[in-house]
Amino acid sequence: MPLEPSRRKLEERVLALENKLLEQKALNEKLRTAQEEYRLLVENSTDVIWSADRNLRFSYFSPSVYQLRGYTPEEAVAMGPEDTFTPSSLKLVKEEIHRRDAGGKERFRHFCLELECLCKDGAAKWVECAGTINLDKDGKPESIHGIARDITQHKNNVKIMQAADKALAAKVLELEETNKAIAMLTEEAEANAKEYKTKMARLISRLSRPYIESFQKTALNKNQKICMDFVASCLSDFEDYMPGRNDGLAESLNAKESEIARLVSIGCTSRDISQLLDIPKRSVDFYRAKIRKKLGFVPPGKNLTQYLTSLYG
């Protein structure tokens, strides 16, 4: 009888141990599954996962370091920081660690840097390196863990865009200079054209004036006198030529209207113009109405002849 309680306690104890073993087994299985998932994640990640101490002595590189740098993880771990980063990038990393070396209460301090890493083929690739500096109890850097992502293509694209922007700015500047040169040439050409017109007007006047004065001394009928007065009026414009003098009028009237306006300015009536140009009088009246309208003489109330004489005289 005395053995019965002791046996019951022993069985209960054994049962408790078996339950703990089952729980531990389940925890170990979960841990194994988690470790397997983590291993698959690390081994299949295109980003490089790495670990190092505060002196940048590496202790781990994920397999993707081979795709990035051409080194196996074992080769990369065996290399020192001078063989891992370019001199300028190594300087940045050391400055970052030194900056975190000021102490403090934080357990972890994060960073993100753009660095150039050295590859087996002698090339250098840009990586975005994000990581955490683990601090000891005194707040000093103890270890570093990070992830490096290849951003070489991105950096190259930025350079291409910057070069394109620079080339575009140069083209814009060149275009502006070209426009300035064109404006100067246009201004010079306009000045030359005005000078040429002035010279031609003087030449025509010098050659024509003697003949006109000779004809005006002869006996002329009414139509001949109108024609001669018309030619003399045109010649006066040549003699008094000023570039742009009647440009607005010339632009507003067509050729036939300009011809009739000139005849009106020297005092010709509609009947005179009809006989001289051999067109119906009603056509002359129609043109006169159009001239008045274009010059703002609508409704009639101003003397068109006087106004045209002031323009052409």
Image (spheres, helix red, strand yellow):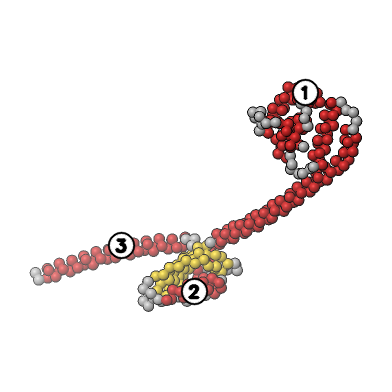
Q: Which mark is residue 254?
A: none
Question: Which of the pair 179/251 is nearer the observer?
Answer: 251
For the residues labelled 3 and 1, the Cα–Cα distance comes to 124 Å
Q: Which mark is residue 95?
A: 2
For the residues labelled 3 and 2, the Cα–Cα distance comes to 46 Å
**Numbered disc in front, either 3 or 2:** 2
Q: Residues within 10 Å of mark 1 (few under 14, many from 20)?
A: some
Q: Is residue 201 above or below residue 280?
A: below
Quadrant placement of the N terminus: bottom left
Residue 204 position within the rendered picture, expressed as x and y whole percent measured from the top left:
85, 41
Identify which amino acid the numbered label 2 is placed on.
Answer: Glu
Q: Residues within 10 Å of mark 2 (few under 14, many from 20)?
A: few
Identify which amino acid the numbered label 1 is placed on.
Answer: Arg
Q: Is residue 6 above or below residue 222?
A: below
Closer to the N terminus: mark 3 or mark 2?
3
Q: Identify the residue position indicated by label 3 in the image.
A: 26
Residue 116 position within the rendered picture, expressed as x and y whole percent measured from the top left:
55, 67
